[in-house]
Amino acid sequence: MKIAHITVLNPVDHTRILKYVKTHLDKRHYVCVVGKTPYPINSKNAQLKYYSTGTIQRNFIQRFLTHLKIFVWWLKNYSQVDVFWIHTPELFWLFFLNKIFQKKQVYDVHENYFENTMEASYYLSFIRLPLAFFVRWMEKIIAKLAFVVYAEYCYENILNAKKYEIIPNTFDEDLLKDISIQHPQELHLVLSGNLSEDWGVIEAIDFWEKQNEFQSCYLTIIGYSSLPNFSKIIRQRIQNSRYSERCKLIGIEKYVPYREILRAIASCSYVLAPYRNKKKFQFKIPTKFYEAMAMQKPVLFSNIPYWNELNQKYQFGFCIKDWESLLMNKVPLGDVPKSFYSWKSQIHKIEKILTS
């Protein structure tokens, strides 16, 4: 079976796509990933191919060109592809093309795009509501044309899809091959992934500076910020800090290979999750939670009720109610069952989708 994973803004080695690809290859399927390549990616596997649509850009012209490149690729390859696994509602038109040619297709819902759009500060306030409703309308049409996969249990009813599955952003431990898990003597914090205001970058810096008033504390900020102005804010804030020599910035204005993020987590004391208390985060389980559980790294997380409930059950970290407070004691870890955080517990669902 030949499977094509297609995205617009995600890099081809996006964490979720990477896990799907590995699973498909393990099951002896052929895979092609169509998307952005902000850094060179070469496949040594004859069953895996990449098609680059360029570098990461959010402006209208670049996005239009990306859609055009995807269309040209589709014209050349649609007859050979058995399953189109599409990772964005932005490719609304592609679902119709695949339906016309009776191609099996999957819509992978990474986020609650309605809530994200409503809370996106980079859109003008009067645009957010109509844009959010337009995106949700597109998604509901797509749900009638494709099998739907949700990345969170809390998304289950948002599209009223008749055929769907829930595959959380759990962690594939095989990705830790050749990565050494360390437990540093000094306090070392890591903030990884999406770097934006709502994801709590400023709160993380406040927390790190507070710890340094009492002991040596190191911070690694690793990931990508899609907003150039916010990237500058991050760098200026660290440059102006009394403890700047204890902070390492990796990526920020450009994407970072996923394995570099895993190495940073593997060598830290705590994983930071200082998300702001927004509606879009209320029932999400961020990927970094699963990554930390797999590597037995405690998560320091914001005071979000659902995360507190999960922590009472699994004891994976500690709730920080005030990100200008001092971490007083070492955070104990419970024995989180592998079935909760492991990608392997989701593999049977992926095969079921392909054969249904």
Image (cartoon, rainbow, N blue to C red):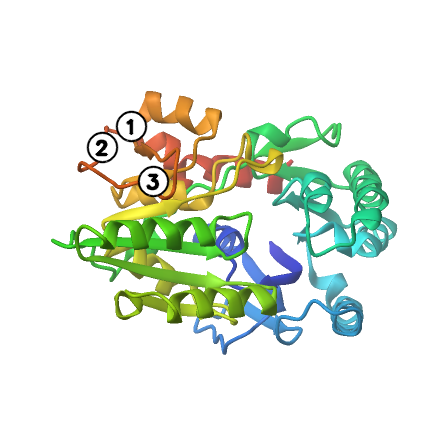
Numbered mark located on residue 333 in the image:
2
Element type where label 2 sits in the image: loop
Of tags 3 and 1, the one toward the viewer is 3
Image coordinates of residue 322 in percent, x first then y, are 39, 37
Question: Would you name the residue on which mark 3 appears?
Answer: 300
Position of residue 240 in the picture relative to residue 118 (left or right): left
Looking at the figure, which quarter contains the C terminus? top right
| Identity of the residue drawn at 35% across and 26% down | 311
Q: Could you give the CA–CA distance between mark 2 and mark 3, rounded to whole angstroms?
A: 12 Å
**Mark 2 or mark 1, which has the lower sequence index?**
1
Q: CA distance from mark 3 to mark 1?
A: 11 Å
Q: Quadrant of the N terminus?
A: bottom right
- Work out whether residue 7 or residue 237 is closer to the camera in this orientation and state it: 237
Q: Position of residue 62 (x, y in %)?
A: 74, 73
Disc ID at residue 96: none
Q: Compute the Cα span from label 2 to label 1.
A: 6 Å
Marks 2,1: beta carbons within 8 A: yes
Is tag 3's residue or tag 1's residue first in the polypeptide sequence?
3
Q: Quadrant of residue 258?
A: bottom left
Residue drawn at x 64%, y 45% as measured from the top left: 108
Under mark 2, the amino acid is Leu
